[in-house]
């Protein structure tokens, strides 16, 4: 489903935390009920951990600094 959503226009906006969440919701709304919201659990795939939930908000805010 994400592949189909990725062919649609992404939500417009500035790259703020709210905009990142709207893009996440757009892409993953058919996959995760929590799409567009910050995760509250730790998760990994293929042995690689995703950003821990307690660091997501600050990591997104710091994305412009990279």
Image (cartoon, rainbow, N blue to C red):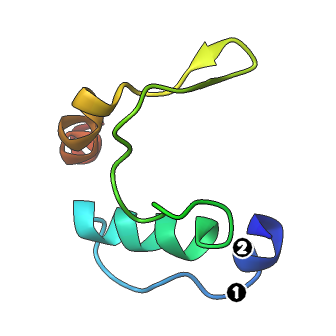
- Residue occupied by mark 2: 6
- Residue occupied by mark 1: 8
Dividing the picture into quadrants, the one containing residue 46 is top right
Residue 17 image label: none
Q: Is 32 on the left or on the right of 16, as rendered?
A: right
Dividing the picture into quadrants, the one containing residue 66 is top left
Q: Is 24 on the left or on the right of 28, as rendered?
A: left
- Label 1: how many residues lie within 10 Å, few (<14), some (14-19) or many (20+)? few
Q: Nearer the viewer, residue 49 or 59?
A: 49
At numbered mark 1, what does the secondary structure look like: helix, strand or loop?
loop
Cα gap from disc 2 to disc 1, whole angstroms = 5 Å
Q: Nearer the viewer, residue 5 or 30?
A: 30
Instruction: Please give the name of the residue rendered at 40% of the width and 74% of the height, measured from the top-left corner.
Output: 22
The location of residue 32, given as percent across then percent down, is: 58, 60
The location of residue 62, given as percent across then percent down, is: 20, 39
Instruction: Please give the name of the residue rendered at 63% of the width and 16% of the height, measured from the top-left corner.
Output: 48
Q: Nearer the viewer, residue 2 or 59?
A: 2
The location of residue 47, given as percent across then percent down, is: 69, 11
Residue 58 lies, with reference to residue 60, above or below; the image says above
The quarter in which the N terminus is drawn is: bottom right
Residue 46 lies, with reference to residue 39, above or below; the image says above
- Label 2: how many residues lie within 10 Å, few (<14), some (14-19) or many (20+)? few
The location of residue 26, given as percent across then percent down, is: 55, 76
Instruction: Please give the name of the residue rendered at 45% of the width and 60% of the height, measured from the top-left corner.
Output: 34
- Residue 16 appears in the rendering: no
At numbered mark 2, what does the secondary structure look like: helix, strand or loop?
helix
């Amino acid at each position: 489903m994400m592949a189909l959503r990725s062919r649609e226009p992404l939500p417009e906006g500035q790259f703020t935390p709210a905009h990142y969440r709207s893009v996440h919701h757009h892409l993953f709304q058919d996959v995760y009920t929590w799409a567009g919201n910050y995760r509250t659990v730790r998760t990994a795939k293929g042995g690689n951990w995703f950003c821990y939930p307690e660091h997501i908000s600050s990591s997104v805010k710091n994305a412009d600094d990279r």
